């Protein structure tokens, strides 16, 4: 068995609204799988089905070898979940929250204590573990949530928007912990995000989802290639000559002269650059300047969803503000 | 790797009740750790006992009076005696304060049990419930822990009220024993279990904290005033009597008054009624709640 997760026609409808529409995908063991999409695309609904919180309307998924509709208890035993919300109990300390989780998984006290110590140490919360959670910062809370979800030593970790609402520095710190986890515990990690650059940087493979449908799946590199590949910009001693020489070179998609420069669209920039150089040098065309730019995830995202991610950002801030208000109201 | 997995199996408790106490304890911790909330929630019934119970002293009204009717020369001890008899006939005891205090035990239990759903609303809104649902704790234990913690809270509150009442002058019937207390607590337990389940079921569907408060406010005082907490059913108008007779508070009050004060009632009927009430409401409440979070 090399798939940690396999979704088969997974569907969830709320009344007439189809939140997740017959999606199929596979997550390989040990990989970080990024689920990328705007708010309301169906990311959270998918994660809720995979973690057995919601029952699918149609289809199913195999998680850790267990069917989510037939053996939900076994699925729950083998997974860890870091939900979008901060779910640690504010009135309890970090340590008490760890022990609470251990109790829910039926882990014996002495084993739980050992693991809690180790995990709190890993997320660098040992110093703060006897403080009430309400005194924690956003980054600390998220780290605690991650530690809490690992108390049962899950094989698959689900993270729903782990960096939502955190500042850039904290976000990259959280990702450092996630990468560390993957290395130390050899876990499969399923993570949803709407930050393009995070998916690009950290995920082994990405699925782009919108309106409940998966639009594309692949490694960040494959996805970028699929929308048209890299752009090589050249500045030569004789642009017209160079253009003629390169026109029929294999692997070149498009070539244009823009502002005294040659813009060459290629499938794989790193592979093509030496070939281009070789041909030009052979024909004694001097290359003065050269640069390779990869398409960004922004372009990939635009290509598949037909819109920019930026429009969604304001929304997530609102969500976070609402959550903060709620927290204050409670405390 | 293989040994590690083996070790893991042994370290795990997979009884059907695992997590039940962990979750119940979580609820209770929040409550006993914040003394202010604990204090605030018992202030109301204590006010009832201390102010209403002491000020509306019917006993003083009928005894120790300087009542004299012009033209009739009735000796004071006869007037006192008549007063005592009227009290006894109406309330079953001449000690109205103790009568009221017994009613307050049901009152505090009712009010506390009604709050059973409040934490569920928060758990739902803050996403805690979703997280609980991803753990191996069974769905029914999540529900039952809420009911259980509410019942425990109610009984502890009732005990505090009882202690305060005794300090303020509540007196038990002579010859009271441990079984009388046990009987009184069983009555409170049954009522609390039924009401806690019912209100949890309402809360789990409530869209907000406010709507649950509205439901609670709609029901608490009517339930209190249509019971025999303050006055006996006999002195109620005829249209109110049938309402009082289906009110579970009436039955728990009657049991507590027989157990603690020695005021006669039909214990068998009272206990049967409360038991049926608790079973029906808890089955309906727990099953409907369980269904809701399982869908």
Image: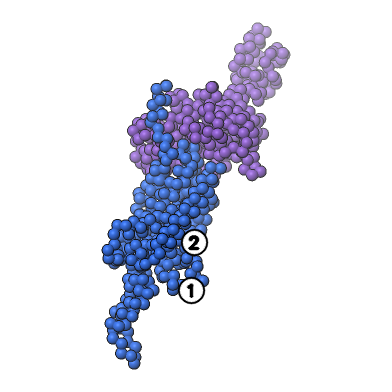
- Label 1 sits on residue: B237
- Label 2 sits on residue: B219
Image position, residue B73 (x, y; %)? 30, 90
Image position, residue A205 (x, y; %)? 56, 25
- Furthest toward the bottom, the residue is B71
Q: Colour of chain A?
A: purple
Residue placed at 53% from the left, 42% from the top?
B294
Q: Give whichever of B53, B211 is nearer the camera.
A: B53
Chain containing the residue with disc 1: B
Q: Give whichever of A33, B11 is nearer the camera.
A: B11
Kindly indicate which chain is depicted in blue in the rendered structure.
Answer: B
Q: Nearer the viewer, mark 1 or mark 2?
A: 1
Q: Element at badge 1?
A: loop
Image position, residue A132 (x, y; %)? 37, 43
Position of residue A68 relative to residue B80, above or below, is above
Task: Report whether mark 1 lies on the same chain as mark 2.
Answer: yes
């Amino acid at each position: 068995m090399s798939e940690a997760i396999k979704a088969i026609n997974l569907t969830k409808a709320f009344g007439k609204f189809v939140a997740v529409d017959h999606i199929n995908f596979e997550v390989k063991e040990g990989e970080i799988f990024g689920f990328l999409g705007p708010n309301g695309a169906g990311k959270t609904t998918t994660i809720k089905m995979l973690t057995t919180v919601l029952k699918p309307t149609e289809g199913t998924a195999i998680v850790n070898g267990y069917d989510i509709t037939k053996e939900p208890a076994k699925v729950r035993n083998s997974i860890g979940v870091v939900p979008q919300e901060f779910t640690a109990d504010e009135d309890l300390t970090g340590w008490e929250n760890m022990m609470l989780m251990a109790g829910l998984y039926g882990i014996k006290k002495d084993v739980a204590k050992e693991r809690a110590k180790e995990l709190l140490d890993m997320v660098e919360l040992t110093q703060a573990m006897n403080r009430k959670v309400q005194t924690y910062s956003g980054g600390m809370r998220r780290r605690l949530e991650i530690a809490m979800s690992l108390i049962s030593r899950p094989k698959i970790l689900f993270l729903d928007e782990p960096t939502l609402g955190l500042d850039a520095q904290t976000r990259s710190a959280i990702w450092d912990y996630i990468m560390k986890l993957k290395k130390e515990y050899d876990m499969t990690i399923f993570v949803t995000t709407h930050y393009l650059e995070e998916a690009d940087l950290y995920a082994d493979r990405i699925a782009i989802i919108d309106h409940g449908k998966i639009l594309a799946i692949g490694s960040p590199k494959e996805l970028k290639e699929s929308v048209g590949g890299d752009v090589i910009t050249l500045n030569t001693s004789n642009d017209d000559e160079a253009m003629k020489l390169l026109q029929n070179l294999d692997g070149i998609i498009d070539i244009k002269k823009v502002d005294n420069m040659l813009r060459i669209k290629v499938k794989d920039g790193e592979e093509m650059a030496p070939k281009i150089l070789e041909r030009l040098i052979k024909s004694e065309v001097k290359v003065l300047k050269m640069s390779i730019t990869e398409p960004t995830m922004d372009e990939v995202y635009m290509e598949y969803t037909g819109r920019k991610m930026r429009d969604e950002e304001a929304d997530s801030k609102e969500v976070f503000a609402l959550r903060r208000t709620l927290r204050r109201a409670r405390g | 790797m293989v040994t590690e997995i083996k070790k893991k199996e042994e370290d795990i408790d997979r009884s059907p009740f695992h997590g039940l106490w962990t979750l119940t304890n979580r609820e209770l911790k929040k409550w006993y750790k914040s003394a202010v909330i604990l204090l605030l929630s018992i202030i109301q019934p204590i006010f009832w006992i201390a102010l209403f119970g002491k000020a509306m002293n019917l006993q003083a009204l009928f005894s120790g009076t300087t009542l004299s009717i012009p033209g009739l020369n009735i000796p004071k001890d006869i007037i006192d005696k008549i007063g005592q008899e009227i009290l006894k006939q109406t309330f079953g005891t001449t000690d109205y304060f103790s009568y009221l205090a017994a009613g307050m035990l049901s009152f505090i239990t009712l009010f506390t049990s009604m709050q059973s759903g409040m934490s569920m609303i928060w758990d739902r809104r803050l996403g805690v419930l979703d997280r609980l649902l991803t753990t191996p704790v069974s769905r029914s234990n999540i529900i039952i822990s809420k009911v259980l913690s509410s019942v425990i809270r109610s009984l502890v509150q009732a005990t505090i009220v009882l202690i305060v009442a005794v300090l303020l002058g509540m007196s038990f019937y002579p010859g009271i024993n441990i079984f009388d207390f046990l009987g009184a607590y069983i009555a409170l337990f049954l009522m609390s279990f039924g009401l806690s389940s019912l209100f949890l079921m309402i809360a789990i569907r409530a869209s907000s904290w406010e709507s649950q408060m509205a439901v609670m406010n709609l029901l608490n005082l009517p339930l209190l005033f249509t019971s025999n907490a303050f006055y006996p059913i006999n002195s109620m108008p005829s249209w109110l009597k049938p309402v009082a007779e289906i009110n579970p508070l009436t039955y728990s009050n009657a049991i507590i008054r027989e157990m603690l004060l020695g005021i006669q009632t039909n214990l068998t009927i009272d206990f049967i009624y409360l038991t049926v009430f608790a079973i029906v409401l808890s089955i309906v409440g727990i099953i409907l709640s369980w269904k809701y979070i399982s869908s």
